[in-house]
Image: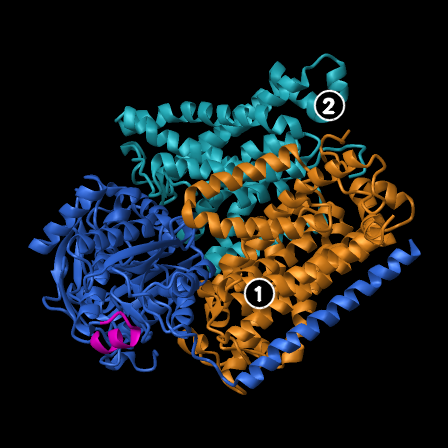
Chain colours: A cyan, B blue, C orange
Amino acid sequence: MDVLFSQLFAGLSLGSVLLLAALGLALTFGQMGVINMAHGELMMAGAYTAFVVQGVVSDAGLSLLVSLPVGFLVGGLLGLLLEVTLISRMYRRPLDTLLVTWGVALVLQQVARDVFGAPNVDVRAPSWLSGAVEIFGVGMPRTRVFILVLALVCVGVLALVLRTTPLGRRIRAVVQNRDLAEASGISTRRTDRLTFFIGSGVAGVAGVALTLLGSIGPTLGTNYIVDAFLVVVAGGIGQIKGTVIAAFGLGILQATFEYSTTASVAKVLVFVVIVLFLQVRPQGLVTVRTRSLA
Amino acid sequence: MATSRATARALPAATLVLALVLSGCGARTDASGGSASSAAASCVDVSGDSVKIGLLNSLSGTMAISEQTVHDSLRLAVAEINADGGVLGKQLEVVAEDGASEPTTFAEKAEKLITDDCTAAVFGGWTSASRKAMLPVFENNDALLFYPVQYEGLESSPNIFYTGATTNQQIVPALDYLKEQGATSIFLVGSDYVFPRTANKIINAYAEANGIEVLGEEYAPLGHTDFSTIVNKVKAAGADAVFNTLNGDSNVAFFKEYKNAGLGPDAMPVVSVSIAEEEVGGIGIENVEGQLTAWNYYQTIDSPENTTFVEAFKAEYGDDRVTSDPMEAAYASVYLWKGMVEKAKSFAVGDIQEAAGGVTFDAPEGTVTVDGENHHIAKTALIGKIGPDGLIHTEWSSGEPIEPDPFLTGYDWAEGLS
Amino acid sequence: MTFLQRLLTNPRSRVLLGFALAAVLLFAVAPATMSTFRLNLLAKFLCLAMVAVGIGLAWGRGGMLTLGQGVFFGLGAYIMAMHLKLADAGPGGVPDFMMLYGSGVVPAWWEPLRNPVLAVLLVVLVPTALAVVLGLAMFRRRVRGAYFAILSQALAAAFAILLVGQQATTGGTNGLNGFRSFFGFDLTDPVNKRMLFFIAAGTLLVMVAVVRQLMLSRFGELLVAVRDQENRVRFLGYDPATIKVVAYAAAAAMAGIGGALFVPVVGIVSPADVGVVPSIGFLIGVAIGGRATLLGPVLGAVAVSWAQTSLSEQFPSGWIYFQGALFVLVVAFLPGGLASLVSRWARRRSAPPAPGAPAAGLAPEEAPVVGRSA
C-alpha cells in the first residue's frame, strides 16, 4: 500500500515536471503553431538565472522566491528576442521554425558552456524544502510537493489570464481565426509577441524549479525537450486542458512502467503507448473543433 | 520527355556497371596481394629534435566536462617534460584532437593521429565505449594508447596501457571495505551502459561468495533526470549500503532525490566509483557530504609529489581548480611513457612493449609500477569520504599497491566471469 | 554552334556530362590525390550523403520532415555489423562481446544474419518494411507536419535507448566494432579500404540516378503536389498516404544502405550514431545544400561533414557557433539552400527558366496546422 501511494506520488510529481516543461510549449506550439526546439534552452536559461541570483541573494529560500519571477523575465525576454528576430518571419513555415530554433538551441548551449563553464553548477535548495512531508504515512519530498504546487499555480494563472483578461480574449481570438481577429482590429503581431513572451517565461520558471531536482548544466534542456513535445502532441493542441491531462497521464504511466520494469524499457513503452494512442485520436486528447480538413 | 526518361533509365545501369567493374578491380588486387593484414610500417619521424604525440579527449559534447580536465593535466605533464629537456633529448610536440563524446569520432581521430599525423603515442579516452572503439584501430596499426580512467576490466591489449584502476584495485577493495564495516546487504544503482553492468556482474559474484545480499539492481538511461522511482525502490529495499555506478549528470538528480527522500550517509551510505573532486561542486556539497568514494588518488593525499602536482596544476589553470584521480592517472601516463622510451632507448612500439615491464614513476598517488604482462599498473586503493570542503579525504587505504588483475584470475569467486 | 556548345546547352547531355564528371572525380581524381585515411573519410561522408539523398526526397520533395532517419540508418548499420561480427566469429561461433557481456549464446534473432546474402537483403528490407508500417500508421491517420516530425524524433530517441539497454545482444553504448573482414576481404588492407570507397561512390551515384528518375516521373510530380496541397490531390482521386509512404520507404531504404556501408568504412556503429542528435545532424547538410534539389543534399552533406571534421580540429567551440549560425541563416533567409543561389544566378543569366528544374527553389510549405483551423 505504501509503495502504491509513493509510486502514485512519483507519477504525479513526474507529471508536474513534464507539465511545467510542456506548458510554455502548449502556448507557443499549441496556440501559435510554432515549434520551438530552443524551448529547452529557455529552461536552461531559467536554471542559470537561479544560479546567478543565488550569487547575489545568499539566503537560499529568498533567492528561490526571487528567482521565479526573474527566471520568468529572462526566459520571456530571450523568447521575445527569438520571436522578433527570427520566428516572426516564418509563421507560414512551421517546419522551418523547428530547424531554425534547433540551430539557436545549439548556439545557446555553447554560449552557456563558454559563460558558465562546462561543469555543472549547484543551486542550494532552501532549508524549508529539505526532507519530506508525511501524507498517509508516506514520505513525500518537499521539493517535489513544491514543484507540484508550482505547476498547478502556473496552470491556474494561465487559465485565468486566457479566460478573463482582455489579453486572453485576444489570444483566443487569434487562435480561433487569425484573419477575422485581424479584421476586427486586434493587432495579431502584438498578440503573437505577448503569447510567445508568456510561453517562454513559463519555460524560465520551469528551469528555476528544475534546479531543485536535477543537474544545472548546458544540456539541461535537451533532457526534457522530447518528452515535453510528446506531452503537447498527446494532449492535443489548442487547449491547456489536454496538456494537463496528458502530462499527468504520461507521468503516472512512466512511473508505473518504471516500477514494474526498468527505466529504459519504461521510456520505450511510453512511446509505444503514445503512437498507439495517436492511432485512435490523431489530433490528441482534447481537440478544438474546426471546419478545416486537417 | 520520352527520350529524357530513356536516358535517365540508362544512367543507373551505366553507373552500376562502372561501380562493379571498379570494385572488381579492388577485389582482384587483394587476391593477388595475399593477406597483407599487418598495416603499413610506422611513419613516426624521430630524426628531428622533436617527436609528436597525440592527445585525444572529448573537448565538445556531453563528456567534455570530464575529459577537458584530463586534457589539461596531460598538457601539464608534457610542458613539464619539455621544460626538463624532453624525452631522449627530443621535445614533445602535441597534436590535439577532439573526440566529441562519440565513439565513432574517437575511432576516426585515432586513425588520423596514427596514420596521418604519425604520432609516437596517443593519450586519452574516457568512456568504455571510446576505448572499445579505439582498441581495434590501435591493434591494426600497431600503435600505442595510454588510457587514464578506471574501467570495468576483463581486457588486456598489447597496444594499450591502462593507467587507471582495474576492478580489483577499485571495486573489490570497496566491497572489502563495506564487508569490514559489517554491511550484509547492498543495493546497486548504475547508468545503463557497459561499465556499471560489468561492475555489477562482478559485485554480484563477490556478494554471493561473501554472504552479502544484493537487494536490487537498477539501471537508469544515460541522461536520466527523474530518480523518484529508483530512490523509492532503494528506500523500500532498506539495504545497508548503496553501490553507485551512475555516470555524469544522473548523479546530481540521484543525490538530490536521495537526500530529499530522507536518506543519508548515516542511514544508508552510498559508495560511488565515478564521483571525483570535479563532480562534487556540481552535485552540491550539501547533497553528498559524508558519502563514500573509491579511487586511487585524492587531492588531499599528503606527499611531496602530490603537493608539487597540485601546486603546478593550480599555477597553470587557476586556484579554483581541483585535481582528481583520472587527471592524476593521465599525468602519470605521460611520465610512464617517458620512462618506457628511456628504458628502451627507442620510440618504436615493439621496443617500448618489451621495456614496459617494471617501469616505475613516483606519481602523486604514490609509486606506480607497470605490469609488463597485462599493461596495467599497480595502484593503492583508497576509500574516501566527501568532506564539507568539497574535497575527498582518505578513510581507508589498502596500504600497499595492489597488483593489477584485470581478469580477476586470483579470486576464486570470479571464476566464470571472463 | 560547336559540338561543345551543343553539349553544354542541351539539358539531357548536361545531365550525362554531370554524371561523367562526378564519376571521374570520384573514381579517378580522388583515389589518385588522397591518402588512404582521407579517402576513407570521404567514403564515410558519401555514406552520410546517401541518407541525405533520401531526406531530400522525403522532406524536400514530399514535405515530410523526418527527424528520425537515424533509426533507418541504424537498422542498416546494425544488421551489417551483426553479420560482420558473426562472419568474424566463424560458423557456429559467438561474437567476442557476447562472451563478455552476454550469456555466450547467440540469440535466435541473430542467427539468420550468418547468411551473407540474407544480410544484404535485410539491410534494405528491414528499414523499408519498418518505414512502410510506420508510414501507413501515420499517414493514413493524416498525422503530418509537426506531429510527424515530433513522432519521428521520439522514435529515434526510443530506438537509441532500446539499443543501449540491450547490452548483451547489441553491445550497448559500446556498439559493435572490431570487424576484421568484409565478405571475406581483410578490412585492415588499404587496398580493400579503397575498394570500399569505390563501392560507396558507385552506390551513391546509383542512388542519385534513381532519385532523379523518381523526381522526373509522374510519381515525383504527385509527391510535390501532395507536399503543396495534400487535399487537392485527394480530391483528384489519388491517395496521398500511399504516395507519401512510398517516398518515406525509399528514403528509409537509402538510409539503411548508407548505414550498412558506414559500418565497414568506419569500423564501428554505436547508439551515438543513431539517436536524436545525429538524426537532426543528417538534416543540416540537406537544408544548407538545398532540400528540394537533386544534388543539393548530397553536396551539402559532404561539405558539412568535411567542414565538421576539419574545422572542429582547430576550434571545437567555434565550430558549433559557425554551424548553428549558418544553419539558422540558411533556413530562415534562404529556404532553398545554397542551391537556390546557383539557380537564381543561372536564371539571371538566361531569362527563360531551365526546363529540367521545375521546382529548384522551394515551393511554399504546408500552411500551419493551427493557422488554417476554424
Residue B179 image offset from top left, x and y in percent:
19, 67
Amino acid under disc 1: Ala
Q: Which residue is mark 2?
A: A178
Give the answer, above or below, for where B364 lies relative to C333: below
In this rendering, would C69 be left or right of B78? right
The answer to whether dots 2 and 1 both sit on one chain is no
Residue A7 image offset from top left, x and y in percent:
44, 50
Q: Which residue is mark 1?
A: C32
Q: What stretch of residues is rendered in magenta? A: B346-356
Say if the magenta span includes residue B349: yes
Depth order, front residue of B236/C122: C122
Q: Using the image, name the chain to which the residue with label 1 belongs.
A: C
In this rendering, would B273 be left or right of C338? left
In this rendering, would B125 be left or right of A285? left
> In terms of secondary structure, what is the magenta stretch mainly?
helix
Q: Give the residue furthest to the top.
A: A185
Q: Quadrant of residue B52?
A: bottom left
Secondary structure under tag 1 reads helix
User: How much space separates mark 2 and mark 1, taking CA atoms?
Assistant: 61 Å
Secondary structure under tag 2 reads helix
Amino acid under disc 2: Arg
